[in-house]
Image (cartoon, rainbow, N blue to C red):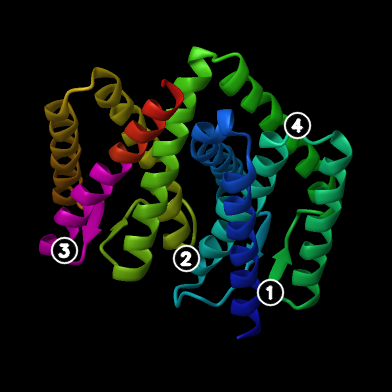
Amino acid sequence: MKNRTLYLSLNFLSLLLFFFTLWKGPSEKKRYILPLFLALTGLNYIFEFWVLIIGRAYTYKPKMLKTKYFDNVFGSNVSQLFVVPTTGLFLTIFQLKYRWFLLFAILLTLIEKLFLKNKIFRLHWWKTYFTTIGVPFFYFLGKQFGKLLIEKKNRFIEIFTVFLAIFVSYTTLNFYHVALLKTCLFNIRVFKNLYRSHVAFATLYGALCSIFFIGSIIIKKWYVSILTCFSLIAFEGYLINKKVITISNGVIFYPISFVTKILSIWVGKYVYSSINK
């Protein structure tokens, strides 16, 4: 219960900060708030792919999911989907001074120490001072990203923002339908833990799908989006036939796979239209 309470409390506080930013943020920046939030989350997901999944730097223990590795990834979601992006968004939208970067870095370091003390977070090769140093760097990166997106209207950053928004949506939805409904599993084992291997390949596959989805969004034809979804589902059918992917039930898997893709494209279209008004 203690594990869940602390992790969910962080989620709740992060959501409060997000809605405060949405409420009090400058009116001319409001249309950028969700795109920037998803972009910052996407950057965190990429970081966590290398550090948590590939590097196994630390382990989260929220005790929310039965499968231990999925529980670890859920704990990562608390940090990378909520805490770090929302604080970075807050600092960027309100253009706060660099001393605020340090203040939030110290706060997150103290939270990490609290989690370590309560044994709901475990370090392997990661050091706590890495967090203290790395968080301000991420905030600086987020501030520069926001400047290029909002003020400079850099075309590459706009497209990259759409990619990150789709990537976050697709990989998050995909993770939860697998973790909660046990819909499918990649059978390619590159790590001793099969679930760790699955998350690694699912993340890479999510990035690949996101690239295809961008094309369908830019073309702005609904039938291109539908064709893209069915083409990817057909590819998944091929992987299932080759036993690269195992599914629990086709009646459940294929509709969920289709809905996940459609929702991700919808998020991408919303972000694309928001930043191009």
13 versus 2 height, above or below? above
Report how far apart the C-alphas of labels 3 and 2 lie in the structure.
20 Å
Report how far apart the C-alphas of labels 1 and 4 lie in the structure.
29 Å
- Looking at marks 3 and 4 on the same chain, the residue that comes earlier in the sequence is marked by 4
Report how far apart the C-alphas of labels 2 and 1 lie in the structure.
15 Å
Helix, strand or loop status at disc 3: helix
Marker disc for residue 140: 4
| Tag 2 residue | 70
Report how far apart the C-alphas of labels 1 and 3 lie in the structure.
34 Å
Report how far apart the C-alphas of labels 3 and 4 lie in the structure.
43 Å
Within the magenta stretch, is there residue 260? yes
Residue at (23% x, 22% y) in the render: 220
What is the three-letter code of the residue carrying label 3? Ile
- Looking at marks 1 and 4 on the same chain, the residue that comes earlier in the sequence is marked by 1
Residue at (35% x, 40% y) in the render: 267
Query: From the viewer's perspective, is 84 left or right of 41?
Result: right
Report how far apart the C-alphas of labels 4 and 2 lie in the structure.
31 Å
What is the three-letter code of the residue carrying label 2? Phe
What is the three-letter code of the residue carrying label 4? Phe
Give the quadrant of residue 153.
top right
10 versus 148 height, above or below? below
Q: Is residue 61 visible?
A: no
> Magenta stretch: dominant SS?
helix
Residue at (59% x, 71% y) in the render: 8
Q: Marks 3 and 4: which is nearer the front?
A: 4
- Looking at marks 3 and 2 on the same chain, the residue that comes earlier in the sequence is marked by 2
| Tag 1 residue | 120
- Looking at marks 2 and 1 on the same chain, the residue that comes earlier in the sequence is marked by 2
Residue closer to the observer: 263 or 167: 263
Helix, strand or loop status at disc 1: loop
Q: Marks 3 and 2: which is nearer the front?
A: 3
